[in-house]
């Protein structure tokens, strides 16, 4: 379903009537701020995930303890 210019005009007029011409810019600013914060958090999450993986890989040393011969109870 596509909105034509007439439908968009009707929606804008209804918004102006319902909320007033002074409240609409404030609402749009809040929406834009929310979108910007969401984008920043997505970028930060991607960076943190990559850094965590590198840290986990580099901080896990491999220690070889060697093998000991274990005597079975049947062997005496």
Image: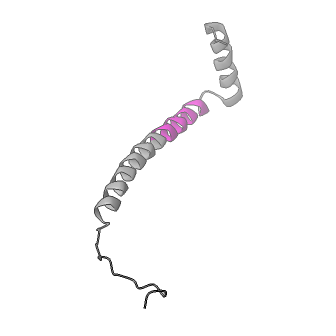
The correct choice, above or below, for 14 with respect to 32 in the image is above
Q: Is residue 33 left or right of residue 51?
A: right
**Magenta segment boundaries in residue numbering:** 23-36
Q: Is residue 61 above or below residue 54?
A: below
Q: Position of residue 13 (x, y in %)?
A: 67, 18
Instruction: Residue 47: give x, y in percent of width and height.
Output: 36, 48
View extreme (bottom): residue: 76
> Residue 70 at what x, y percent from top left?
39, 83
The structure residue drawn at horizontal position 29% and vertical position 68%, both measured from the top left corner, is 62
The colour scheme used here is one colour
Q: Main secondary structure of the magenta part?
A: helix
16 lies above or below 35: above
| Residue for point 54% across, 36% down | 31
Left or right, residue 26 beside residue 20 = left
- Closer to the camera, 51 or 68? 68
Give the image location of residue 39, x and y in percent. Answer: 44, 40
Is residue 24 covered in magenta? yes
Above/below status of 50 relative to 5: below
* Rendered residue at 63%/8% (across/down): 4
In which quarter of the view is residue 15 placed? top right
Query: Is 39 part of what is drawn in magenta?
Result: no
Residue at horizontal 32%, vertical 66%?
Answer: 60
What quarter of the picture does the C terminus occupy?
bottom left
């Amino acid at each position: 379903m596509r909105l034509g210019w007439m439908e968009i005009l009707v929606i804008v007029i209804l918004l102006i009537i319902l909320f007033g011409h002074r409240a609409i810019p404030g609402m749009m600013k809040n929406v834009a701020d929310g979108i910007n914060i969401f984008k920043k958090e997505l970028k930060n999450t991607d960076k943190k995930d990559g850094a965590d993986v590198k840290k986990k890989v580099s901080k896990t040393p491999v220690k070889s303890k060697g093998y000991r011969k274990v005597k079975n109870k049947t062997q005496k």
